[in-house]
Amino acid sequence: MVDYDAIASSLANRIVASDVRELLKLTEGRKIISFAGGLPDPSLFPKEDLAEIARQVISERGERVLQYSPTPGVGEFRRELAGYLERVGVAVREGDEILVSTGSQEALFLLGMAFVDPGDTVLVEEPGYLAAINLFRMLGARMVPVKVDSEGLNTDDLRKKLEALDKEGVKPKLIYTNPTCNNPNGTTMTMSRRRELLDIAGEYDVMIVEDDPYSYFTFEEVEFQHLKTMDKEGRVVYLGTMSKILVPGLRIGWALGPAKAIRRMELVKQIVDLHSSTLSQYIAMEAIRRGIVDRVVAKAKSLYKRKRDEMLAAMDENMADLGEWTRPIGGFFIFFKANAKLDFKAMLPEAVERGVAYVPGQAFYIEGDGRSTMRLSYSEPKPEEIRKGIELLAGIIREKTG
């Protein structure tokens, strides 16, 4: 038998399994309260609307809908999407292009493949999005962590890191950020920090990747603009997705940015999968056109706010003496840091056995720090499950800290 481990590529050997994806496999089919994956609440899925759209577009335009489509995406959908993005405050400027991807994760992968070589330097939030960390690790990039605090990416720390790199003679390829309702922190970057980030990126001539799945779900009146909208120099590539604002099963995401950047990504996509699902693009297009996306977002904001409030209240009541945590103004996540030295990764199997799951915080740190942290998602569990799950977690932590 072939020794597949022996012949695996160096790139494949750098791939680390996603803690979230592995957890989803572990919890599938089990009666468990899961604070692990950032899964949308399935009660929000407009099943009947999407079934009707699918039936209609196939019956009326089946020859086109079921056929191959251009790599950048169906032109009619990209125009509809551009209009939608403008409506929600994302600037689509002259000279910009949209590339439709198979979820925003593919858009991030295409960007990495197009611009990052082994040994290149990228600046990444810490704690930061684990799929971005895993991608840059797979590509052999040198990742430089930038602190995240209650105001988002810390621009003072960013400047220090860039100054140090400049003294080394190193020019970074990009800065990756999830500035609004951040994953995993739940924090939102202030407007002053956003302006500073753009100024610093301009000073050092660095591309910015703005990953934005969660800005649609803000629960408080907080002023913010998308980096893509504030950008006057054409250095921001904006990534988005239908997964949270419609349904993840369509697997539709996108990259929006200067045409030269998007064209590079398009060439990689030609090799990866030719194009994203034509049928899914037509369904997504009609969902935008018919106001279904707007209705889902409106319902989701109300529901997720109620769940966030339930989790924060339960944590205040049960965990006040056990640690500290973020208080997000939107999105799906709360990030917890224990007062005691705990290893939440080692604790996870016991927690799952007792009926509750979370993501250990180590996954969100480049060098595996953050043992005493965990990410909690309130998006999928029912409100009554949230309270019970937090009580279970608090009990386990108390047992471990004695």
Image: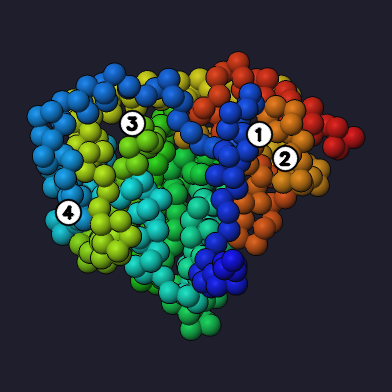
- Tell me the quarter of the picture where residue 222 sits: top left
SS at mark 1 in the image: strand
Say what amino acid the circle numbered 4 marks.
Answer: Pro
Q: Which residue does the numbered mark 3 point to in the structure image? A: 246
Residue at 46% of width from left, 40% of height from top? Answer: 181
Q: Which mark is residue 348?
A: 2
Q: Would residue 343 be found to the left or right of residue 112 on screen? A: right
Q: Quadrant of the N terminus?
A: bottom right
SS at mark 3 in the image: loop
| Depth order, front residue of 171/247 | 247
Q: Which residue does the numbered mark 4 point to in the structure image? A: 70
Q: Would residue 21 be found to the left or right of residue 260 on screen? A: right
Q: Which mark is residue 329?
A: none
- Contact between marks 2 and 4 (CB within 8 A): the answer is no
SS at mark 2 in the image: helix
Say what amino acid the circle numbered 2 marks.
Answer: Leu
Image position of 127 with respect to 318: above or below: below
